[in-house]
Amino acid sequence: MTQPVPNNYDTQLLVAYLDGEVDAQTRRDIETRLAADPEFHRQMIELEESWKSLDLLEIVHTDKEVLKTTMELLAINAQKDAEAARPRTPKDGNLRLATLLGALLCAAGLTYWTVAAMVPNPNQQLLQDMPIIENMEYYKPVGSMEFLEKLMNSGLFDPHE
């Protein structure tokens, strides 16, 4: 014959009874049931033997630092569990989306400035040649560069003047 599985409420009631945590009326009700219900009485005896066995165990004193570290770890794990159990709100999604968009904009700006710094500006040469282009009408009668080079080498003009 198999033994019935103890009722969790009965176990809690007997634990409270053995610890002296029940009021007088509940104590009388439990004692009446113990006298009438052999299975309930057997549960109480098993719990009482367990309590006696606990009294035989050696008390181990732990280091305060170990206790502190353990409590800190428990607090961290409890906080993580609470955060994981916290329902997500649309506000959380909006914050994530805004953060993602901000990161993408920063990456795009950084990419633009990097490329702009590395690739030469094709208009830069035009900007440097702008004074010549503006005065092009004065240079047309010269004809060629060879004439200007001969003129420069002739020594007629002092470059430091």
Image (spheres, helix red, strand yellow):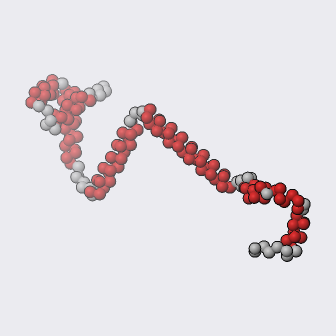
Q: Residue furthest left?
A: 24
The number of discs equals 0
Indicate the quadrant where residue 129 lies: bottom right
Q: Residue at x 54, y 40 (%)?
A: 101
Q: Residue furthest top?
A: 36
Locate the C terminus and report the quarter of the image it occupies: bottom right
Image coordinates for residue 112, horizontal then vertical, percent: 63, 49
**146, 57: nearer the viewer:** 146
Q: Residue at x 32, y 50 (%)?
A: 72
**7, 112: nearer the viewer:** 112
Q: Is residue 31 visible?
A: no
Q: Residue at x 75, y 74 (%)?
A: 160
Indicate the quadrant where residue 137 lies: bottom right
Q: Residue at x 33, y 46 (%)?
A: 75
Image coordinates for residue 61, horizontal then vertical, percent: 24, 55
Q: Is residue 7 visible?
A: yes
Image coordinates for residue 69, horizontal then vertical, percent: 32, 54
Image coordinates for residue 131, horizontal then vertical, percent: 75, 58
4 lies above or below 69? above
**129, 65: nearer the viewer:** 129
**31, 119: nearer the viewer:** 119
* 105 lies left or right of 145: left
* 98 lies left or right of 122: left
Locate the N terminus and report the quarter of the image it occupies: top left
133 lies above or below 98? below
* 146 lies left or right of 69: right
95 lies above or below 2? below
